[in-house]
Image (cartoon, rainbow, N blue to C red):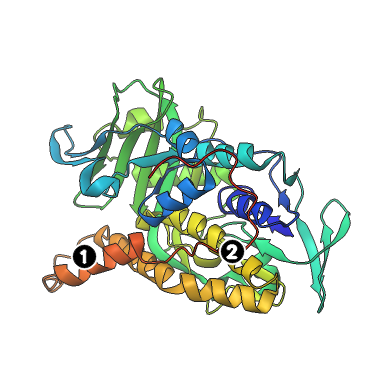
Amino acid sequence: MLVAGASIAGPALAHWLRRRGAEVTVVERAPGLRPGGQAVDARGVAKEVIRRMGLDAAVRAACTDTAGAHTVDVDGNVLETYRADDDGGDGFIAEIEILRGDLSQVLYDDTRDGVEYVFGDRIAELTQDADGVEVTFASGDRRRFDLVVGADGLHSALRAMVFGPRERFVRHLGLVLAFYSVPNEFGLDRWFLEYQDPGSARTAGLRPIKDATRAMAMFGFPAADSDIDHRDVESQKHLLRERMAGLGWLTPDILAHLDDTPDFYLDQVAQVVMDRWSNGRVALIGDAAFSSSPMSGAGTGLALVAAYLLAGELAAADWDPEAGFAAYEARMRSFVEANQEIGRLHAESRAVPNPDAEPAPEPDMEAFTALIDRAINGVDLPDYAGVPDSGPSEPPAKP
């Protein structure tokens, strides 16, 4: 099998495909793993997937060790506090919080000896027939695979190639987020700090990371009209400076490191909404299939759970793509929709306030609590008894 993308969904899927008996190649257009990135979380059922992978200890060892979060005013005074042990570790700050790049490294280290990784290349063309998929790579290499899975993110080239243009599937939520690491000259000590300007809905934040000498800077701003080239970094930096001008708190000091950071990232907050995630012998997983946006706090959890289910259902169907892909979609759909709804609601809460708007109705807290529970735990993980399993790389940690 060929998997496109070596961030999180791709290596996680490679782990489970290998355990189910498949030979796996992962192709990644970048020359190597990308470091840093935003902090990502694992909650509820996603923590159980990590345990079944045998990676609980490795993942926890690489976590940011964030104690909690303070929202602050422009002068740094604490307004609200959230702790990592709230809601059994599944609250606003999750007990398993790890930089995207660090989790990617854990997954790569786990799979590198049993999976073929090809960096610095990409799928240029593919043609599928009843028995397989002919793939031509940008390097000129041509190979044939039984199945191909796109785990190449929000801007998935494979999705565009097989399913159609991105405009059919990508839904922008009217926000832009930026992340990059900076020297920890702010006295940050295990507590995430976030400032939101009430008038403009712009946000600035600092998050602790494993390396206590550095911190992860975060910015957000409403931008329904921004057409962002996700590969033009200089234009992105210019946009960030322009939109964050005049924002108080620590913003000027954080922006002063914009040109020195090794891991700048900026993009629109968006979701991917598709009627189906497979076409013949080609399927999608993770953000390529069902991005819930960073506002959901669940993209990584969705990727990990989907990897477990996709590999399991394919193996249970004796690698028949029609049956395996259909079962995977059926198991994931409600879980995905709940997390996408959380993402939309969170994005709406960050919108610029309209003083002329009618007061919002009181929320139905019972329904909202049920939605959160479905977004965290609302999917079954079959044991796949009778399906081949070569076992985890290390003994699972006790639950």
* Type of amino acid at the residue the image marks with label 2: Gly
Q: Position of residue 244 (x, y in %)?
A: 35, 43
3D distance between C-alphas at marks 2 and 1:
30 Å
Q: Position of residue 211 (x, y in %)?
A: 43, 24
Quadrant for the C terminus, please.
top left
Element assignment for label 2? helix
Residue placed under numbered mark 2 in the picture? 312
Ranked by sequence position, the earlier of labels 2 and 1 is 2
Quadrant for the N terminus, please.
bottom right
| Residue visible at 48% across and 58% down in the picture | 305
| CB-based contact (under 8 Å), mark 2 and mark 1 | no
Residue 361: image tag: none
> In screen coordinates, is 163 left or right of 197?
right
> In screen coordinates, is 18 left or right of 332?
right
Q: Is residue 154 visible?
A: no
Q: Position of residue 152 (x, y in %)?
A: 62, 56
Residue depth check, mark 2 versus mark 1: number of the one nearer the observer: 2
Could you say which quadrant of the image residue 86 lies in? top left
Please name whichever residue, 259 or 209, is drawn nearer the observer in this view of the structure: 209
| Residue visible at 71% across and 51% down in the picture | 26
Category of crowding for the residue at label 1, using alpha-carbon neighbours closer than 10 angstroms: few (below 14), some (14–19), many (at least 20): few
Q: Can you say whether 147 is above or below 254 in the image?
A: below
* Type of amino acid at the residue the image marks with label 1: Thr
